[in-house]
Amino acid sequence: MLPNERLDYSAISQRKRLVLPGGARLAVWVIVNVEEWDINETMPRTVLTPPAGGAPMPDIPNWAWHEYGNRVGFWRMLEVFDDFQIPAVLAINGSAIGRYGAIAQAAKQRDWEFIGHGFGQKNMQKVADERGDIRRTSAAIREATGRNPRGWLGPGLTETWDTPDLLAGEGYDYVCDWVLDDQPVVLKTSGGKTIVNIPYTQECNDVAMMLIQHHKASEYQDRAIDQFDQLYADARHGARVMALVVHPYIMGAPHRLKYFRGALAHIRQHPDVVFRTGEQILDWFVAQG
């Protein structure tokens, strides 16, 4: 199915007003992406360009750059979540659950939601067996948490033409790859089921800001606050959803962490804002009818 066949166009100004419980205006969810990078393959991203160019293997500098996030950066970020008592959503590669068991255990202890993020950190269009990859990811999360995952985030937000159909067929209730709205939207699938897209973000995403646009670390806080302030104002017309996206090897770096903390501190000052997981946002939206 083509994208415009999966969802109908809808102007946000012409929709039924969405209302959050308790008179809240904005639902904020924070997604922590934990990945395993295969040392035997080209690294998904790089901080250092190899001196002679190309994609050498093993690529120790860039593999180690990412590995720092799971060894140190995640634990630094975890203190921020604990200090603010904010629930997070763990978007995790299925293979990373076994590799970084302490991270999975820490997230489970805090009742974070686990969502599928591919079995490995690879473009879904390059996965030989997409359905098998989804099933392996689901099985890894189920073994770690005792629950089937309800949400999915493609590695790098990548999908094939069939991804929503496969996800719906494998029991997923929501996806995050379609970054096109400030409210959840319903996607059609070829099997007749529907799957909901929960608002994610490419703008308040540390990959875009730090690695692609090469901004100073403080850009994360500045942009997150500006994004929040506008969505908060928009929400006078009906509830909105805001996402914040972080990766341990990026915002968990020593020189960046305070800007992640600063963004959350600004948002936390507003009493009519609620922090939610993806499945909590989904269940609220579905109940709206």
Image: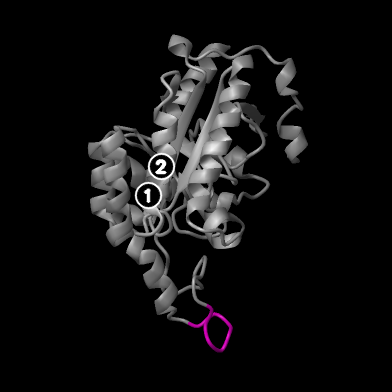
**Is-magenta flag for residue 53?**
yes
State the mark number for residue 258: 1
In this rendering, is residue 49 above or below 8?
Answer: below
* Residue at 44%, 73% in the rendered image: 62
Residue that badge 2 annotates: 262
Q: Residue at image x 47%, y 20%?
A: 283
| Quarter of the image that includes the N terminus | top right
Q: Position of residue 150 (x, y in %)?
A: 44, 33
Foreground pick, 60 / 203: 203
Mark 2: few/some/many CA within 10 Å (<14, 14-19, 20+): some
Mark 2 is on which residue type? Answer: Gly
Q: Secondary structure at mark 2?
A: helix
3 drawn magenta: no
Query: Callout 1: helix, strand or loop?
Result: helix
Q: Amino acid at mark 1?
A: Lys
Q: Residue at x 54, y 61 (%)?
A: 211
What is the magenta range? 49-56
* Percent x, y of residue 111: 28, 33
The answer to which quarter of the image holds residue 67 is: bottom left
Front residue of this view, candidates 115 and 20: 20
Residue 87 x, y percent position in the rendering: 34, 33
Q: Are marks 2 and 1 in contact (CB under 8 Å)?
A: yes
On screen, residue 230 above or below 105: above
Q: Is residue 6 left or right of residue 123?
A: right
